[in-house]
Image (cartoon, rainbow, N blue to C red):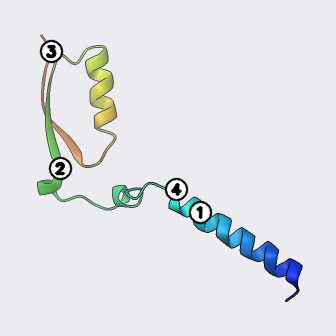
Amino acid sequence: MKRRQFLQSSSIYMAGAGLAGMLPSDIFSLQRKVAASDKVRIGAIGVKGMGWADLTNILKDPRAQCVSLCDV
């Protein structure tokens, strides 16, 4: 391997290692199944407007579960 090839390949590997370190540590944990006992159970009161936006954002996480709603 020539010096130039070595420098190119090592810089690519180092850049990849640096980018991998920037990923959130829990990125892969959201893909696995979550036990029912590990879920956060949520009850929401007043789910119009911002309440609905908040609830839909929370429920994007598979560890969250909505168990009750109230909107009078």
Mark 4 surroundings: few (<14), some (14-19) or many (≥20) residues within 10 A? few
Question: What whole-number distance in Å separates the C-alpha atoms at marks 2 and 1?
Answer: 33 Å
> Upstream in the sequence, badge 3 or badge 1?
1
- Residue shown at 30%/14% (left/top)? 49
Of tags 4 and 3, the one toward the viewer is 4
Question: What whole-number distance in Å separates the C-alpha atoms at marks 4 and 2?
Answer: 27 Å
- Residue shown at 29%/26% (left/top)? 54
Contact flag, marks 1 and 4 (Cβ < 8 Å): yes
> Upstream in the sequence, badge 4 or badge 3?
4
Of tags 3 and 1, the one toward the viewer is 1
Find disc 2 in the rendering and name its residue. 39
User: x and y percent of residue 62 in the render?
Assistant: 29, 48
Q: Quadrant of residue 28?
A: bottom left
Which mark is on residue 18? 1
Find disc 4 in the rendering and name its residue. 22
Q: Is residue 27 left or right of residue 64?
A: right
Quarter in which the C terminus is drawn: top left
User: x and y percent of residue 1 in the render?
Assistant: 85, 89
The disc labelled 4 sits on which kind of residue? Met
